[in-house]
Amino acid sequence: MTSYFINIWMAMAFIIAVQPLAGQGSSAQKKVLLLMGSRFEITAVAEDDTIAWEAINAGIAEIQRIEKIISSWDPQSQTSEINRQAGLMPVAVDRELYDLIFRAKKISQLTDGAFDISFASMDRVWRFDGSMTQLPTQEEVAAAKEKINWQDIILDTDQHTVFLKEKGMKIGFGAIGKGYAANRAKFVMEKIGGINGGVVNASGDLITWGKSNRPEGWTVKIADPKEKDKLLGWLPVKDNAIVTSGDYERYIEFDGKRYAHIIDPRTGYPTTGIKSVTIVCPDAELADALATSVFVLGKEKGLKLINQLNGIECLFVTDDDDIITSENLKLNYK
Ligand code: AMP
Ligand code: MG
């Protein structure tokens, strides 16, 4: 019987681990690799190891295919073309990209603009690649912020075109792309006959499926942020996604103050007040987008939003290490 842990956040307040299925005669195969600039762990459980590897390879190919479409670093991607044509002309794109942008705009609407893929104009002033030597001026922030507006991402249903209305606008899928890729990888892996279960873990954006032979099913362990070696509890993640946004993932520090990679579109500045947000729901893309959204919305508004949404739960850690959970999220203690 195989039993092991997949660590998601090694260095942070939480230590989460998933115990994969290990049914009768089944064994889990796992591949760890860099995709979309992030560490992915892809696990498949099958009675036949060859089938498990077939599924893992299919999952990897799917993620690489998606990366080619949504990467804003790759000048060849359709996303880069949309950005190059900002303020100039609409760009015809694949149905898949069109639909992703459509869904991203829906999340912007739901979150009153807290989530906005056009945040990407800010990467001219906030760079988290080590190249910043000083804080941007208020004028620089204000000028870049002017270009953020999800309502200026114009979609044409008939032509399948995307048009960024203003010159200097830019879109990026940093807050939703890994969740989408995790969903898709799961989808192609499940389609391969003989796969009993699996996990796609995109650096903490994680989706599981299949039955577990353990009485508690698939579980995610949660450590106490105040005492990292102490277990606070665990959550079941049966056929669910669990996604975390954290301020520790990418940040810069000036004068002892931490500036994290999630930008509040209303101010143009990195968000404050929350250390991490974890969302649990069946869909990894939605969980990904909502984790980033709640980060921006903050404690009160974020919690209110999640409590209004059916089948979606959250757990977050504030800057003071308080742990707050949504109404129906039940942490198990034993
Ligand atoms: P996540 O780790 O899913 O919370 O995504 C964080 C990433 O999303 C950042 O590194 C940015 O690429 C992008 N991002 C930052 N602020 C926003 C925002 N307000 N709305 C959408 N995407 C954002
Ligand atoms: Mg996200």
Image (cartoon, grey):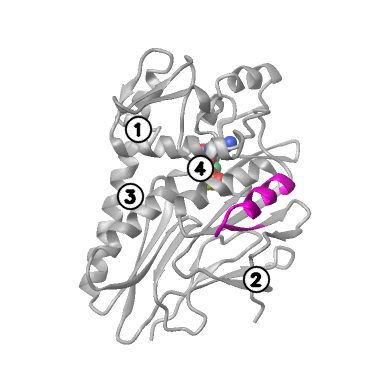
Residue 254: image location, x then y, percent? 71, 35
N-terminal of the pair, mark 1 or mark 3, is 3
* Mark 1 or mark 3, whichever is nearer to me: 3
Q: Secondary structure at mark 3?
A: helix
Q: Amino acid at mark 3?
A: Ile
Q: Nearer the viewer, residue 172 or 31?
A: 172
Q: Amino acid at mark 4?
A: Ala
N-terminal of the pair, mark 4 or mark 3, is 3
C-alpha separation, residue under disc 4 versus residue under disc 2: 26 Å
Residue 291: image location, x then y, percent? 57, 49
Q: Which residue is mark 1?
A: 74
Q: Which residue is mark 4?
A: 175
Residue 263: image location, x then y, percent? 61, 35
C-alpha separation, residue under disc 4 versus residue under disc 3: 16 Å
Residue 67: image location, x then y, percent? 34, 42
**Can you tell me whether the CB of the residue at mark 3 lies under 8 Å from the nearest atom of ligand 1?**
no
N-terminal of the pair, mark 1 or mark 2, is 1
Q: Which residue is mark 3?
A: 63
Image side of residue 180 versus residue 246, left or right: left
Q: Are marks 2 and 3 in contact (CB under 8 Å)?
A: no
Residue drawn at (29%, 86%) of the image:
25
Identify whether 136 is placed above or below 316: above
